[in-house]
Image (cartoon, rainbow, N blue to C red):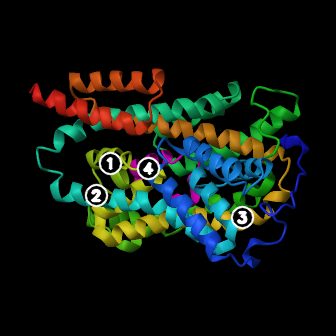
Amino acid sequence: MASALPETPETPETPETPETEKKPTAVELLQLAGLFLKLGFTAFGGPAAHIAMLEDEVVERRSWLSRQHFLDLVGATNLIPGPNSTEMVMHVGYERAGLVGQVIAAVCFIGPAALLTGLLAWVYVEFGTVPALEPFLAGIKPAVLVVILGAVWKLGKKAVKGWQLVVIGVAVMIAMVLGVWELWALLAGGVLGMVWLVWARSRGSKGGGEGDKRHTAVLLPFLPNLPNLPNLPHINVLAPIGQQLANAPSLWEIGWFFLRTGAVLYGSGYVLIAFIEQDLVQRYGWLTQAQLLDAIAIGQFTPGPVLTTATFIGYVLAGVPGAVVATLAIFLPSFVFVLILNPIVPRLRNSVWASAFLDAVNVAALGLMVVVTVGLAQGSLVSWWSWVIVLLTAVGTFYFKLNSAWIILGGAVLGFLFSLLG
């Protein structure tokens, strides 16, 4: 059915005119707010689940977008940094009601998760040292490892399409182990892998995977600028200040870290963990390894985007202002990218280079996630029952395919039960 649709639909749900010229009605804005508040409170299960729920709501139930245009948006979103499902929400808001719609969709989808995460952060700061909470968190930490591994497995089945991509992923892992900064490792894996894959495919090799032929070169104009990011004040200013102030960063430092991280975050929301572990834990010392695991664990209790983990960390570092700054900073780049990308999506078509970059950067991101997960495991698998929790939650994740929220809840219950055994 989708193949019968025109490549650049001119139906009301996929207009050719710039969406910023639209004057949305109050009814349209209320419809957007209602839909994305509902999804904001119920969208558990990660980006793939979020996009599936979104497709059901805006294509199947409401016919706001054609299926072909929805697929075009998904393909284009995979080419830019940031959380894919949140960016798809922003795309739908923009398509439906222009810039105002994009703002409403983003706030209503991110807001519930940010508020719930902020509330849990307050509880953690106020009562986190109370013994009654420690058994639950101790059981959640091993379960978090399984959730991350589950995400790596699911992403890997799509990302690893041939032996060349395996080599790229392993090379990034080796670079991380040797101490290369994760941003350089990610960019090098993406750019060098792209060149290699394009060369191999031009010689008729299919080992790197054929890629999605809908991908386009929209990413390429940004590539020359990306390597300059580490030369910004992050390198010369934040490192010494972080070392001097230990666990007392300023709001500017918190905002800058999450802003530049949101601008280069490829692969999955879980890749945020790699940046936090390498910078906030290892380089600046703003967080401890235990606090990072707690942040990930508490973030899993909430629906919506995984990146609201930034809300928790911002609150731990600087209270309510820190939570607000971190949340706005981590999502602002995605908002800008969508605003730039959406009007040109109808013209996006084939690009060998963009497809190759996407393939390479995805396996590079998976390599980052694997290395960080191993590091986190060293700090959480410290008892025999923590290994039992890993095994049980792994069965729930990989065999029964339970929602990650149930996995985290199960880890909390198991941690409490094992604590009763002494």
Whether residues under marks 4 and 2 lie with C-beta atoms below 8 angstroms apart, the answer is no
Q: State the SS at label 4.
A: loop
Is residue 52 in sight in this rendering? yes
Q: Which of 373 and 63 is in front in this view?
A: 63
Residue 57 percent across, percent down from the top left: 63, 50
Between the C-alphas of marks 2 and 3, the distance is: 34 Å
Query: Is residue 267 inside the magenta stretch?
Result: yes
Residue at image mark 4? 303
Whether residues under marks 1 and 2 lie with C-beta atoms below 8 angstroms apart, the answer is yes
Residue 298: which numbered mark, if any?
1
Question: What residue lies at 39% left-to-right and 69% top-to-bottom?
Answer: 324
Label 3 crowd (10 A; few <14 / some 14-19 / many >=20): many
Rendered position, 148 above or below 232: above
Whether residues under marks 1 and 3 lie with C-beta atoms below 8 angstroms apart, the answer is no
Between the C-alphas of marks 1 and 3, the distance is: 33 Å
Question: What residue lies at 74% left-to-right and 47% top-to-bottom?
Answer: 71
Identify the mark nearer the N-term, 2 or 3.
3
Residue at image mark 3? 95
- The secondary structure making up most of the magenta span is helix
Between the C-alphas of marks 1 and 2, the distance is: 8 Å
Residue at image mark 2? 121
Identify the mark nearer the N-term, 4 or 1.
1
Q: Which amino acid does label 2 sit on?
A: Ala
**From the viewer's perspective, is 36 left or right of 101?**
left
Label 2 crowd (10 A; few <14 / some 14-19 / many >=20): many
Between the C-alphas of marks 4 and 2, the distance is: 15 Å
**From the viewer's perspective, is 78 left or right of 291?**
right
Task: Specify the segment rendered in magenta.
Answer: 261-279
Label 1 crowd (10 A; few <14 / some 14-19 / many >=20): many
Whether residues under marks 2 and 3 lie with C-beta atoms below 8 angstroms apart, the answer is no
Q: What residue type is labelled 4?
A: Pro
Residue 44 percent across, percent down from the top left: 47, 44
